[in-house]
Amino acid sequence: MHVLGSRKRNQPAPPHAVFAALIDPDRDPTRPWLILLSDEQRPAVLERADPHLVVWSSLWPKHPTARIRFDLPSDGGSGTDLRWTLYLDTPDLDDSAVGHLRYRVNTLINAKLRRSFGQ
């Protein structure tokens, strides 16, 4: 698998809360955050190690081999230093397509998920 992108950013919630949100995005219907576009699909959890690792299947039917890995170490306080890494078997996408995939993961995780925790 080839790495298409990776980003680390602090989340205000502790690892166990971020882990729970990633394995069950609909767990709190008052705080929806996994809002998908028409060309996206709900991911399946392929791997998990409570509370420090989650791996999702692809968000994109056009790219079924894509995987998103979430590493969830504590930030040493009450938050999580979440790192997402996007993988794809065949990196034959143009720069624009790769940029779109990275943008979507970053938007979902570092904007929408983060906001669902109050920031």
Image (cartoon, rainbow, N blue to C red):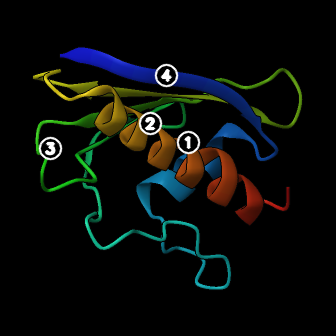
| Residue positioned 19% across, 29% down in the render | 93
The quadrant of the picture occupied by the C terminus is: bottom right
**Distance from Cα at disc 3 to Cα at disc 1:** 17 Å
Rendered view: 7 above or below 3: below
- The label on residue 106 is 1
- Which amino acid type corresponds to the residue marked 4 in the rendered image? Ser
Count of all numbered marks drawn on residues in the image: 4
Q: Earlier in the sequence, mark 2 or mark 4?
A: 4
| Residue positioned 21% across, 36% down in the render | 66
Which quarter of the figure has residue 81? Answer: top right
**Distance from Cα at disc 3 to Cα at disc 2:** 13 Å
- The label on residue 63 is 3
Q: Earlier in the sequence, mark 4 or mark 1?
A: 4
- Which amino acid type corresponds to the residue marked 2 in the rendered image? Arg
| Residue positioned 40% across, 68% down in the render | 36
- Which amino acid type corresponds to the residue marked 1 in the rendered image? Asn
Q: Position of residue 73 (x, y in %)?
A: 64, 23
Check disc 2 and report the residue beneath it.
102
Element carrying mark 1: helix
Relative to 110, is 106 on the left or the right? left
- Is residue 67 visible in the rendered image? The answer is yes
Q: Residue furthest right?
A: 77
- Which amino acid type corresponds to the residue marked 3 in the rendered image? His
**Distance from Cα at disc 2 to Cα at disc 1:** 6 Å
**Distance from Cα at disc 2 to Cα at disc 4:** 8 Å
Q: Nearer the viewer, residue 19 or 58?
A: 58
- Is residue 68 visible in the rendered image? The answer is no
Mark 2 crowd level (few <14, some 14–19, many ≥20, 10 Å Cα): some
- The label on residue 6 is 4
